[in-house]
Amino acid sequence: METLNYRFEQGSRRLAERAQLVGVVSSGNLEVLIEPAALDGACAIEIKTAAVGFGAIWQAVMRDFQQRWQLADVSISINDMGATPAVVSLRLDQAVETMLGGGA
């Protein structure tokens, strides 16, 4: 297992005052817990992954996600069992959209 941490400063979009869990941890999938947090406008992401050595890819996916959503005062925890970058992006978008009231 590998743990990766990313922090993006100066976001502009705050989410609902409740946590949201999407996805499941199983072979080739992941779960995302997204929740409000007092982070001085930042978005903090912690990833626990079974796929060791893919930090550069995770960083690119997280950077792209934050550029799309510009989250502020949000903490995201990801438990990964080998999901592809497309599945990671899908689950992250699903979590944000759920918090914004766009469904599950």
Image (cartoon, helix red, strand yellow):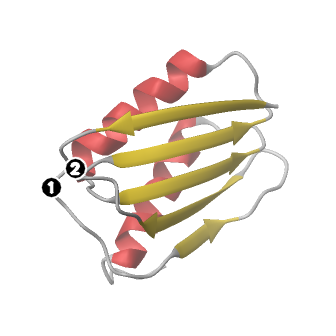
Residue beneath the point at 52% across and 22% down: 57
Eyeballing the image, is 3 above or below 29?
above
Provide the secondary structure element on which disc 2 rests: loop
Q: Is residue 7 left or right of residue 85?
A: left
Which residue position is annotated with label 1?
Answer: 12
Residue beneath the point at 26% across and 56% down: 72
| Residue 7 x, y percent position in the rendering | 39, 37
First in residue order: circle 1 vs circle 2: 1
| Amino acid at pointer 1 | Ser
Q: Which of the two residues, 41 or 59, is positioned nearer the viewer here? A: 41
| Residue 55 x, y percent position in the rendering | 58, 20
Which residue position is annotated with label 2?
Answer: 70
Give the Cα separation between the discs numbered 1 and 2.
Answer: 6 Å
Q: Are marks 1 and 2 in contact (CB under 8 Å)?
A: yes
| Amino acid at pointer 2 | Gln
Q: Residues within 10 Å of mark 2 (few under 14, many from 20)?
A: some
Provide the secondary structure element on which disc 1 rests: loop
